[in-house]
Amino acid sequence: MNPPNTNLQPGQSGNDVAQLQQFLLAQGLLTQADIATGPGIYGPKTTNAVKRWQQANGVDNTSGPGFWGPRSIAVASGQGGAQETEQDIDAQYMEAALRNPKVASLINGGDTAESIFAALQSGNLSGITNSQGMPFSVEEQQKAMERGRDDTKLYYEALQNKETASVEANLAQKQANYQDYLLNSGQQFEDDKLKADKSAADSGVLFSGSRFQKERKMQNAYNQDQQSQFGATSRDIGNTAQDFQYKYGNKAAGGLKDFFKLGANTYNAGVAKGGVGSSGISSIYNPAQSNYQGTRNTERSTAVNQRAAGYLQNRGNKLLASGYNNKL
């Protein structure tokens, strides 16, 4: 069973949590009876199972024991926590492209990979008429379009895969940074609350009105800071997602929906212990709010047309060179 690749925490529920439970079941850390008490619910049994898995696999969980975050996801997916760079991703797609037989044959003819990819983009802007100055047949144009699509498929599919992987890594890192903020902020609130309670007890004002007001101020300060962090992260994720949507359209951006979700802490200074809970997960970006066809999609369509025009013009030139005009 594959592990989920989204950040999860105690108190959540849903299909991703159910997937995590099935993964822990396969690891021998949960039983069917354990899952039956709360299927799809990130409760104490799931939390303890995650802690045991983290300990067994050497995951540094000091910032959130029992939380399924970036470090756990990296180890579970076999990445060991290593972060791929943009150069690593570029190299992988270039290597894959070079293994394509069509590209390899062109390179053997003296062209470089860079010049081949540039040609696939630029095409030929000449008109699409035959040797008599008349339009080519529909069948001839369709064949030219098919060749143009074949020529551009390698480049544009590799480009979309690369840019999708890059934006997913970018959005996942933003989510992870915000999750770390929530964990650290929650721990700091509990520490501050414990210190304030101890100070009030030592001063004999544990049940005074002034203590209640100070707790309220502290709670409000944490809430305001969290709202600021939530807003900044939401805008950051929204801008990144909108840029990707602008390139590839609404449907492609909708496929990134798992990266648009953020949760929050709930702070309560008026309890005896703890005082930090977790609110529900909310979506902070909706691709349907903007309607983009996708500049990359338009660019690809233009490149296909240009390649097709080039093939038709070359066919017309060959007909002229062979004396086809003299046969009329």
Image (tube, rainbow, N blue to C red):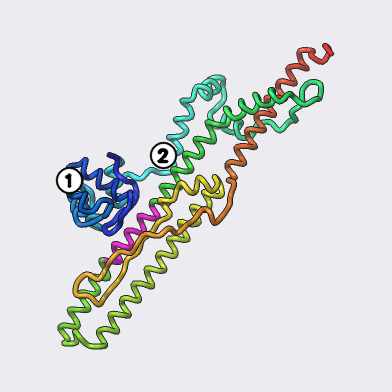
Mark 1: few, some, or many residues within 10 Å (few <14, many ≥20)? Answer: some
Taking the magenta stretch, the answer to whether it contains residue 314 is no
Please, what is the three-letter code of the amino acid marked with disc 2? Asp
Q: Residue at x 16, y 87 (%)?
A: 204
Residue ID for mark 2: 88
Percent across and percent down for residue 95 are 45, 30
Circle 1 residue:
31
Residue 279 visible to the viewer: yes
Q: Name the one closer to the observer, 146 or 38.
A: 38
Amino acid under label 1?
A: Thr
Question: Which mark lies nearer to you, 1 or 2?
Answer: 1
Left/right placement of residue 286 relative to residue 80 reads right
Dot 2, how many residues are within 10 Å of its Cα: few (below 14), some (14-19), or many (20+)? few
Residue name at image x 38 percent, y 55 percent: 175
Q: Seen in the image, is 154 located left or right of residue 226?
A: right
Q: Which region of the structure is painted magenta?
A: 173-186
Determine the image quadrant of residue 221. Answer: bottom left
Is 164 in front, or is 45?
A: 45
For the residue pair 2 and 226, the one nearer the viewer reads as: 2
Residue 246: percent from the left, percent from the top?
56, 49
Please tell me in which quadrant of the rendered image residue 234 appears.
bottom left
- SS label for mark 2: helix
